[in-house]
Image (spheres, helix red, strand yellow):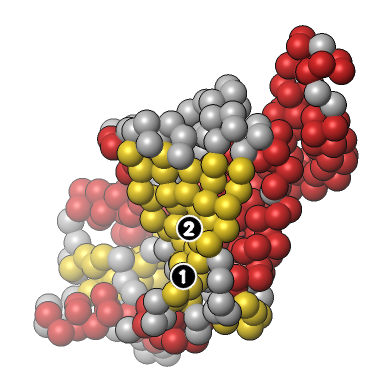
């Protein structure tokens, strides 16, 4: 274990005792150990010295005429500026209740009078080390927090600034891919156009997911519930993704009938649908088929996106929604993925009182389903209970 290189001369100790000989002895012992020493002969003076000098450790007598050690400790612990200063009681009291009282008030340790010189130095050095370690940890925590905040801000700025031009480029590639065929522009040019379309499609989704994921992880994403027909929301979101399917000549069928009212964040549901549709297209063969369905249970609406593509190995299923793992594979046309989409979908689904489930069989396809609570208040009360 790595230890700090403690230099005693860098640390100030306040010794508080109303008996002058005790102060002289403490000063002699601690000075010999090279600590900086300041002293006080009573509780009131001790609080004044703390305010002025901000010592690194306090040796505090309990029995004093103006303010006793307990009262001094109570005031120190009530002051945010000084509550973390370690305090070692110096006491001639040997009643366990008196010692326990000191610990309950926040004392770090105690030394019985008359004290042993080596014991005093050892206990002081130990608590100076602990205080230095704590300060280092707090500094590193603050530095890490600043680094994380700067990183998240950079992610948001990059994703936000690039989203609009990449979105425009995506639409252009979509329209060109749909309206131009191999015979018109030639096989090689069509393959390049398809590759460009796949790249812009994936980049746009990555930027959008990154923007939402950063907001979610930094607590800046608000969930705004609306009472809506989930069937209408799913149909609208799916139709928006139809162009992606058309590029691979994939048929999208709908098993969405009836009227199912839920409380949900519409934008989050659209994001979930866009990711699941993209995933289904990615792993479907040219000319394949996707089925989107909606059904209800007594408490939830359940939306499913089924493809008849390559499927997923059974051992890989647990990896897909595990935040500790980064699992992604290439699609049927070598489409790349970031692995972030499903993580985001899981987070957004849980914000809407539901869960994501996956069913898949290698070579036969996959079904990704997510549920949305019909009544969010009831769902949240169930989670709390």
Q: Which residue is mark 1?
A: 295
Would you say 184 lies left or right of 84 here? right
Rendered view: 369 above or below 289: below
Name the residue: 52% across, 38% down. 339
Q: Is residue 371 visible?
A: yes
Name the residue: 35% across, 48% down. 359
Would you say 187 lies left or right of 297 here? right
Question: Which quadrant does the N terminus fall into?
Answer: top left
Q: Earlier in the sequence, mark 2 or mark 1?
A: 1
Quarter of the image where one finds residue 164: top right
Residue 282: x and y in percent read 57, 34
Question: Which quadrant does the C terminus fall into?
Answer: bottom left
* In the foreground, 140 or 85: 140
* In the foreground, 60 or 173: 173
Quarter of the image where one finds residue 95: bottom left
Name the residue: 24% across, 67% down. 110
Q: Are marks 2 and 1 in contact (CB under 8 Å)?
A: yes
Residue 242: x and y in percent read 70, 47
Mark 1 closeness class: few <14, some 14–19, many ≥20 residues within 10 Å: some
Q: Is residue 326 visible?
A: no
The circle on residue 62 is none
Measured Cα–Cα span from mark 2 to mark 1? 9 Å
The circle on residue 304 is 2
* In the foreground, 59 or 275: 275
Name the residue: 65% across, 47% down. 209
Instruction: Look at the numbered disc 1 and give the secondary structure of its residue.
Output: strand
Mark 2 closeness class: few <14, some 14–19, many ≥20 residues within 10 Å: many
Residue 65: x and y in percent read 37, 89
Would you say 92 lies left or right of 36 here? left
The residue most toward the front is 183
């Amino acid at each position: 274990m790595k230890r700090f290189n403690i230099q005693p001369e860098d640390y100030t100790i306040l010794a508080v005792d109303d008996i002058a000989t005790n102060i002289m002895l403490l000063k002699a012992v601690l000075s010999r150990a090279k600590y900086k020493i300041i002293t006080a002969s009573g509780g009131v003076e001790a609080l004044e010295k703390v305010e002025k000098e901000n010592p690194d450790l306090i040796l505090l007598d309990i029995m004093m005429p103006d303010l006793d050690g307990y009262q001094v400790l109570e005031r120190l612990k009530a002051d945010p500026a000084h509550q973390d200063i370690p305090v070692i009681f110096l006491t001639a009291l040997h009643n366990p209740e008196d010692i326990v009282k000191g610990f309950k008030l926040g004392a770090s340790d105690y030394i019985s009078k008359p004290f042993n010189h080596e014991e005093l130095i050892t206990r002081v050095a130990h608590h100076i080390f602990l205080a230095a370690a704590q300060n280092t940890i707090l500094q590193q925590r603050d530095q890490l927090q600043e680094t994380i905040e700067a990183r998240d801000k950079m992610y948001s700025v990059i994703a936000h600034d690039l989203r609009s031009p990449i979105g425009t480029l995506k639409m252009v590639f979509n329209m060109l891919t749909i309206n131009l065929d191999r015979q018109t522009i030639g096989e090689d040019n069509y393959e390049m156009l398809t590759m460009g379309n796949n790249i812009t499609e994936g980049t746009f989704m990555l930027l959008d997911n990154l923007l939402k994921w950063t907001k979610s992880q930094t607590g800046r994403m608000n969930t705004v519930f609306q009472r809506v027909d989930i069937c209408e929301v799913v149909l609208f979101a799916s139709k928006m993704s139809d162009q992606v399917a058309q590029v691979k000549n994939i048929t999208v069928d709908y098993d969405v009938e009836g009227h199912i009212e839920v409380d949900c964040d519409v934008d989050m549901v659209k994001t979930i649908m866009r990711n699941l549709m993209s995933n289904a297209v990615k792993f479907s063969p040219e000319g394949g088929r996707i089925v989107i369905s909606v059904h209800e249970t007594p408490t939830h609406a359940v939306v499913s996106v089924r493809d008849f593509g390559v499927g997923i190995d059974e051992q890989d299923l647990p990896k897909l929604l595990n935040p500790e793992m980064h699992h992604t594979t290439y699609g049927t046309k070598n489409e790349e993925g970031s692995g972030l989409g499903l993580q985001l979908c899981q987070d957004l689904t849980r914000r809407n009182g539901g869960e994501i489930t996956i069913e898949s069989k290698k070579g036969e396809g996959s079904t990704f389903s997510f549920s949305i609570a019909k009544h969010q208040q009831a769902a949240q009360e169930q989670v709390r209970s």
